[in-house]
Image (cartoon, grey):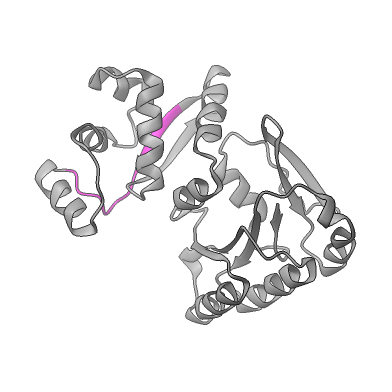
Amino acid sequence: MFIGPKGSGKSSLMKALIPSLNVDFEEARYYRDYKVGDNLYFREVEGKMDAIDIVRLTFPRWNVKALVVVADSSRPDTVSKAYGMVTTLGRTENIAFVLNKTDLETEEARQLAVEVSSKLGATLFEVSCKDGAGIGKLRSWLGLEEIAVISERAAEARGGRIVPIPLPDIPREEGELRKYLDEKKIKVDDTDIALLLLVDGERTVDEIAETMGLKKFNALVRLKRLTSLGLIKELAITI
């Protein structure tokens, strides 16, 4: 379930987590559901306290696997408001406190997010839907990697193409890449390194898999893992 003040980027975050999800960017009235898998839904709650007050009456009966609390890192007041929403609901476990829009982050908002996350016993994620930073780690925490892969394959079946987008700070030469991975203490195998060197923002997953001699699904799973490790910006779907 996704909660947070209006304008914090709940809809954009859901779209970033599952790129093929058909998201309505208008604010929900009370709440809105999106089916993302078998018996699995994203529930987006309206970003107003009166909606939270209504939702809390039935919240204990909902089978909520995880609560994703979203705040805008450029607006410290949204951190406080998001905290108030959680305490109103009374949720005490499986909470992800997401500081969104880190490309616009203020230190005040970040420090406040660290403080309230600690109070809630929540896991803090700093993400940007604009450049994809942190999205992979949140997706992994939510256990959405397989769903995202299936969703992307379905989109591809409708005529879409999946293109891995590189991060600008990831070295493009093998020796430099291995040194970078060692310094960051990121463990990958030789196949992963070869995959990373083929990610240029133009090659599709099909083309990378063919070059590597891998089955497409296996290549896609590896690329999703590399994305969750912060080594690939995103797997973009183009139509």
Residue 85: percent from left, percent from top: 75, 69
Residue 184: percent from left, percent from top: 24, 58
- Residue 172 drawn above or below residue 203: below
Residue 225 relative to residue 120: left or right: left
- Residue 46 drawn above or below residue 75: above
Image quarter for residue 221?
A: top left
The residue lying toward the viewer, choosing from 110 and 63, is 63
Residue 219: percent from left, percent from top: 35, 26
Residue 42 relative to residue 13: left or right: right
Image quarter for residue 80?
A: bottom right
Residue at image position (70%, 63%) is 4
The residue lying toward the viewer, choosing from 202 and 71, is 71
In the image, the segment drawn in magenta is: 162-172
Residue at image position (17%, 47%) is 177
Q: Is residue 19 found inside the magenta-colored segment of the image?
A: no
Residue 204 in view (yes/no) = no
Residue at image position (29%, 51%) is 168
Residue 21 relative to residue 237: left or right: right
Residue 38: percent from left, percent from top: 68, 29
The residue lying toward the viewer, choosing from 40 and 175, is 40
Q: Is residue 166 found inside the magenta-colored segment of the image?
A: yes
The residue lying toward the viewer, choosing from 140 and 197, is 140
Image quarter for residue 8?
A: bottom right
Residue 230 relative to residue 237: left or right: left
Residue 234 in view (yes/no) = yes
- Residue 127 drawn above or below residue 22: below
- Residue 186 drawn above or below residue 125: above
